[in-house]
Image: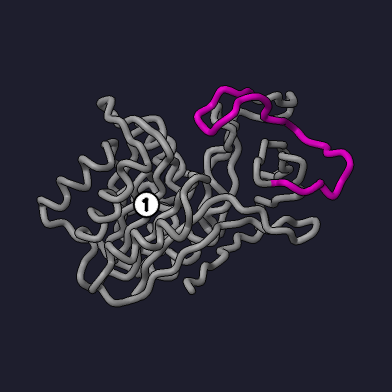
Amino acid sequence: MTGLSVLITEGWEDYALLDSGAGRKLERYGPYRFIRPEAQALWQPAAAEWQADGEFVGGSDEEGGGRWNLEPNVPARWPISRGPVRFHATNTPFRHLGFFPDMGAQWDWMRARATPGSRILNMFGYTGVASLIAAEAGAQVTHVDASKKAVASARENAGLSGLAEAPVRWLVDDALKFMRREVRRGSRYHGILLDPPKYGRGPDGEIWQLERDLPELVHLARQLLADEGSFLILTVYAIRMSALAIKALMDEAMSGAGGSVEAGDMAIREATRGLLLPTAIFSRWSR
């Protein structure tokens, strides 16, 4: 029988999952509290009423379509930290706040393997928190995202963290096109993080579809891993996909590489009762 893991992110000084239930969650980002929809919170919340600085309402999926109702005290953005790395939180039209706190456990695991001078590739790097955590550890980072706005935000976060001069390549590019070129160039990386969306567009209108494109993405990543490479992380936020499925894909891609593959759920621990709120699935290889 194939065992699956649960990768748990605990709250930290600047973030906490305070309560959850009835299809919603209450979180703290720095000094501000927000309510967001959460389909996996099937239970009842601990508190009968929540006090918050804002709530995201409407919309039926992660592609947008909803809106924030915010109190006047909420700024356009504000700095928060994860260890020595600082970055901005902001209420985006896509219901999240400019980063994904459930990645905390993955960031910590990656940082332990991002040794000085190692080459790390962060695909779909968004606002750059993972890239900055690797750079702070001394790694040479290649950060790729299709959104010019996201890469600009990542560079601003680098400045906020005092890492503006760190060895990070900030690239606006289509994921598959970039990785295919890197394979042809013979580029190699010691660690790779893949955090693809369910659907997306490249800078020239390229269409990304998770179910169609994920197998090629993972196999390209395998080709880009150096012989002495130490990790490959894949996170998936598509509920219809199974952790068993992406583990089988990772097992196939990493066949003959040695090391080990694990997979399972990612979750955040609720501060009030210790409940685990599942957020995504993952598979990762390490040596």
Q: Nearer the viewer, residue 16 or 183?
A: 183
Considering only vertical position in the picture, is 156 above or below 129? above
Q: Which residue is mark 1?
A: 194
Looking at the image, residue 273 sits to the left or right of residue 194; the answer is: right
Residue occupying image coordinates x 37% and y 74%: 260
Residue occupying image coordinates x 24% and y 63%: 225
Question: What span is colored magenta in the figure?
Answer: 41-67
Residue occupying image coordinates x 40% and y 62%: 247
Q: Position of residue 254 (x, y in %)?
A: 28, 67
Q: Nearer the viewer, residue 155 or 245?
A: 245
Instruction: Locate the C terminus and report the quarter of the image it occupies.
Output: bottom left
Looking at the image, residue 143 sits to the left or right of residue 17; the answer is: left
Q: Position of residue 205 (x, y in %)?
A: 28, 25
Q: In terms of secondary structure, where does tag 1 sit? A: strand
Q: Position of residue 14 (x, y in %)?
A: 65, 51
Considering only vertical position in the picture, is 247 above or below 69? below
Q: Nearer the viewer, residue 17 or 1?
A: 1
Residue occupying image coordinates x 32% and y 63%: 191
Q: Position of residue 273 (x, y in %)?
A: 80, 59
Considering only vertical position in the picture, is 5 above or below 75? below
Res 93 → quadrant? top right
Residue sticking out furthest to the right: 48
